[in-house]
Every structure is written in structure tokens, then in C-alpha cells.
Amino acid sequence: MSAQSAVGHTAAPLDADSTRARIRALVVSQGPINASRLAAELDVTPAGVRRHLQALVAAGEIAERAVPVTGPRGRGRPPREYVATTGAQEHLPDASAELAVEALDFIASALGEPGVTQFADDRLAELEERYRPLVESSGSDVAARAVALAGALAADGYAASARRPPGELPLLQLCQGHCPVQQAAEKYPELCEAETRMISRLLGVHVQRLATIAGGGHACTTSVPLTAAPSPAARAT
């Protein structure tokens, strides 16, 4: 008896999620693989498998490609097979965060806090140089520079935005909804401090970090004054 007939319609959403996850796992481990083989492995109808495959392709987690055919090909749809994309890796175990913490532990034990701070600054140097032309092209207005920086961060996956907080204070808040180094930053706040210094240099004013995801906040929030003297770091730059 198939899983579909055994479970019934009321459990379809949960069963669909489970089946899709199993299809994704099989494509990762056994791809290239075709729909017929997946249907046989999972005891699901070929039509049902194809619906899940279409959803996974649309989500960017797997890719569809034509199967090379030697000799004459009959009528009908060309045979297709499926392989995993990098999007599928997001659903698999990832030890990179633990590795980053272990690397910082080693730096801290060998070089102490100054070594961690130097590493954090060096890590962001390339990012800062890449962002600088984008920020400077927006002119000298701090608000425009903050909007440009938020756009650059958003393009790199930080889910960033620049917004005016409630009230009439001449402030802007740079918010980042995603932290790619959260686990490491929870143990080593030097990573957040280095990022704050980078933001200050790029905007040319002294900014203040109000909250971080690593510190328990829902976002990394940086207060940017719109009427302030340039920071010492900005003047030096």
C-alpha cells in the first residue's frame, strides 16, 4: 500500500513535507537520478514524485537536466534526471559554525584578545573595500550612505535595511536581520565590535551598536547619527 493511500487526505500537508524531504535527500545522495527511480524508492506514484520535483526545482534546491541519449529517440518527453544544487546543502548538517569557533579558540589561546580583534578587523577588510565605492557613490549625505550600505549588506545576505526610528531625533537605524557568524559572535563579541567599526568608517560618523543577534536581539541594530562630527577613524581614513 502506498504512503498516500495509507495516510489519507487529512495528513497530506505533513506527508508532503516529509516526502519532499526524502526526495531531496535521495537526490543529494544518489543523483543524478530520475523520477521513476525515485518513485520506486519511495513507493510514491511517478506523478506525485514529479510534483515534488517541480517544487524543489522552483525552490532552487535541485536542478533538472536532460539525459544524454544515444541512438534514435522515440516520441514523448525527453528523459530527465535530477541533481542537487547548493540550495539543498542548507538542509544538511553543517559543522562550519563549530569549526569557526574552534579556530577562534585557537587564536585566542595563542595570541590572546588582541589576536582575536586583529582577526576580526582583517576579516572585514575585504568587505569594507568592496562596499566603499558603493557607499561613496551615494555622496556625502549620511542617510544616503546608510541606505547604500544597507543595500550592499542585503545583497550579501544580511537582510539589512535602513529606517528612521519613532520620534524626531536626527537618527537612522541600520538593521541586519541575519548574522552569518552568530555562533562565533556569541562567544567572541570582538566580531560584532569590528563590524561596528567598519560601519562607522564607511558612513564617516561615530555609530553606536544598540543590539546584536548574538547578544539575544532579534536583529543587529546600529544607531547612525545624521548630524554629528566625523569619527576619528573616518577623519584618519
Image: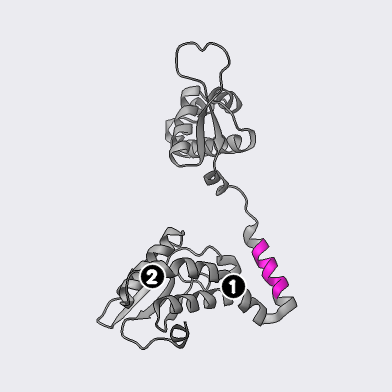
Magenta-tinted stretch: 99-107
Q: Which residue is mark 1?
A: 122
Horizontal relation, residue 123 to residue 220: left or right: right
Name the residue at 57% across, 47% down. Answer: 89
The picture places residue 72, in percent across and down from the top left corner, at 53, 11
State whether residue 149 appears in this view: no
Q: Amino acid at mark 2?
A: Val
- Seen in the picture, residue 169 relative to 25 is either above or below; the reply is below
Horizontal relation, residue 212 to residue 121: left or right: left
- Seen in the picture, residue 63 relative to 151 is either above or below; the reply is above
Q: Nearer the viewer, residue 206 or 166?
A: 206
Residue 168: mark: none
The picture places residue 144, in percent across and down from the top left corner, at 31, 72
- Seen in the picture, residue 25 relative to 191 is either above or below; the reply is above
Q: Which residue is mark 2?
A: 135
Q: Amino acid at mark 1?
A: Asp
In the picture, the quarter occupied by the N terminus is top right
Q: Is residue 134 magenta?
A: no
